Amino acid sequence: MKLKKIRLIPVIALILLLTGCWNSRELEDIGIAVAMGIDKADGQYVVTVQLVNPSSISARMGDSSRAPIVTYQEKGKTIFEAIRRLTKTAPRKTFYPHLKMLVIGEKLAREGFAKSLDLLARDPEFRSDFFVVVAKDQRADHVLNVLVPVEKIAAQNMYVKLKTSADVFAPTLALTFGDLLHDLTSPGKQPVITGIQLTGDPAEGEKMENLQQVNPKVRLKYTNIAVFNVDKLKGWLNEKESKGYNYVQNHVKSTIVTVPCFSNKKEHLSVELIDADTKLKTNSMSSQPEMSVSVKADANIAEVGCSIDLTKQDTIEKVEKLVEKDINNKIRSSIKAAQQKYKLDFLGFGEVVHRSEPKYWKRVKNNWDKEFVTIPIRSRVDVHIHKLGKRGNSYINELKE
Amino acid sequence: MLENGRISVRQFTVLVALYTVGTAILIIPSVLAAKAMQDIWIAGLIGLGAGLVLVFFYWKIAERFQYMNLVEILEKCFGKWIGKAVAFSYFVFYLFILSTFVLRDIGDFMLTVMMVETPIEAIHIIFLAVVLYGVKLGLETFTRTTELFLPWIVILFVVLFITLLPQIEFTNILPVMENGIQPVLRSSLSFIVFPFLELVVFLMIIPYVNEPKKTKKAFLFGTALGGGLLILIATLSILVIGVNETARSIYPTYDLSKTINIREFFQRVEAFMALIWFITVFVKLVVLTYALCLGLASVFNVQDYKLLTLPIGLMLYVVSLVIFPSSTYLIEFTPIYDFYAVIWGLMPVFIWLVSLVRGKPV
């Protein structure tokens, strides 16, 4: 019995050796990639990877004379080849689970980017929750080479900025990689991607001086939404159309609507939308196909720049009408862009038709974009104003003449 | 008596439920989504209905043969020698092959998404070591272990479900029955084969429940519970990650748990969620290996089935490594396996017919 127990010891010892540290990667051996940019040059992909520079972002030991991020660039026939070639220049093996941003250069976006992204869906190191943006009028590497203040890691800065602006202003779109894959393959919706733009000279943005200024010369700024035919960039929407797009998509959580005062057309008041709910509908699509957008929104008065009497129900109703008209205009402009300018269904009406009229959909799905432009779309907006903020009438009403 | 241990009816239910969830939890969403698309839940319900009928039928056989184990049933039915031959091929060509699949599933999973550079042998050895240890300790012990694991499974399932609620998009399951009923039925066939047909292995366990007469309800309830969880997971993955991504993904349930993200705070918990299938795969493999050892021991009149644990374990290890050369092979092989498994899974029908012809056994 005792002998038997002694024999067990080497067996147990072996098990200890077999536990799962095979692919353990120590923190000091990996370069954490936070953003990736893809461009195309000479028939090859140019991959730029932004890594965190750990010694300069640590809170306690932070060495602020060094740049918080560093980028490396390599070319390859596939993304994977380029990434592995990076080991020649980057000091550590790059590590992707913390990737926040994927930036696609405008040139590649115009040529079609979809075939470059399989690695990001296939490789277990990549998650599908990072955001995708297009570098407007730029190469992707220019965008990744900018040093930014506040959030030291540029990719984190871009990530938070996109999330916030999509949440509270709404002409941008926080599109994750998973959503993008869905749009690329769904026959009922063309993809759209938010653009990011660099203001100033790209070369200046790479320097530490850019961080030392109160008003940095080079900044990264989100622009509006780019429209794609599958994976080829066809054009950019303006802010009005972009906002309209987000209304139609039910992406608007909170935003502001500024309308002219009815007392004086040159003065304005702003209303903050606190909740908006959009429904897309189709009729039976049999003889006279027709589709509709209806928006129901709750709002509060946010800022008044003129003298009106907010204590009267009548005034509020007038403001509601103006806000409804404004939102409706934006929606109409995005529908117009889809049906007349680009002739592409980036609004996703095809998916609605697919869900509600599967028989009709089967007939038209192979040339849905052609069918889509001929179908009339009605729109209806219903706004309800609830609160006035912490004042009734504004002090503006009692200003001394 | 080969087995002296006894388990309670309640323990039997838990065993059946977790066995049903087994490896199916990892891949059933993509298996179902491949043909049934967004109608996964209909296919699931039809499959579960048919599965319950099947389970009821298995139980009827156990009852008809007065709760003997499968080998004894076969011997009684076909006579000693033919019975033994049939039992032998049943265990080797169905349950053994199935066990190697189960082991390989967990190995492939670990290698594909969690530890890419680890040799698959290491995963198989560790997993198998635990399973064989369980088998060696006997039915009572591993059943009690299963019972201890149950609360963890329940907690993880509830967490998974609740944390995914905010991301559900109900429009994902529309339109219903876009391509008619046929693809739905084809998918439900896959669901019947995997996992319900595999429940036949419990014919080896029913005899060792302390009140075998009461196992009918337990067997059906356990199956419904396990099947229900699978349908829930499959539907959830359609609702959250959408039908196309579910069908394209090799391990959709893992992808599903990757999407958990509550305010950038509660996120990246997929490794915890993987605990669910580590446990259920363990239960499935331990039940299968136990049945294999017990069955082969009773075919060859080996007095103590525990003698067979190590040799069978070694064979499992080797065959699980060579059975598929690649992931693509597995994907191409799966539809063929469906029909192959039906032949073995429907063996009880044949037993039933033969026993009808030969008259009621004593």
Image (tube, coloured by chain):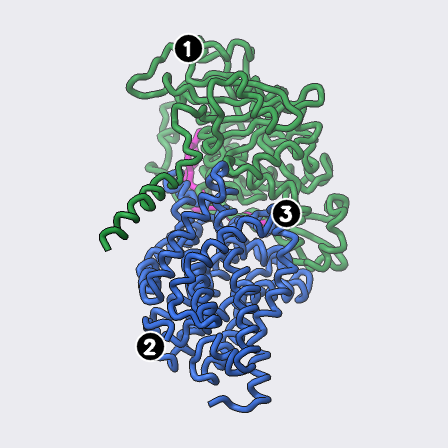
The chain carrying label 3 is B
- The residue under label 2 is B210
Q: Amino acid at mark 2?
A: Asn
Label 3 element class: helix
Asked if the stretch drawn in magenta spans residue A311, the answer is: yes
Q: Is residue A152 above or below residue A303?
A: above
Let me know if marks 1 and 2 both belong to one chain.
Answer: no
Chain letter, colour blue: B
Q: Amino acid at mark 1?
A: Gln
In this orientation, which residue lies closer to the viewer: B349 or B293?
A: B293
Residue A223 image offset from top left, x and y in percent? 56, 26
The reply to whether callout 1 and callout 2 are in contact (CB within 8 Å) is no
Residue A151 image offset from top left, x and y in percent? 40, 23
- Residue A314 shows in this picture: no
Which segment did they paint magenta? A294-314
Sooner in the amino-acid sequence: mark 2 or mark 3: 2
Drawn side of residue A352 relative to residue B320, left or right: right
Q: Amino acid at mark 3?
A: Thr
Residue B243 image offset from top left, x and y in percent? 59, 52
Give the colour of chain A.
Answer: green
> Which of the numbered marks, if any, corresponds to residue B64?
none
- The residue under label 1 is A213
Badge 2 crowding class, 10 Å Cα cut-off, few under 14, some 14 to 19, many 20 or more, is some
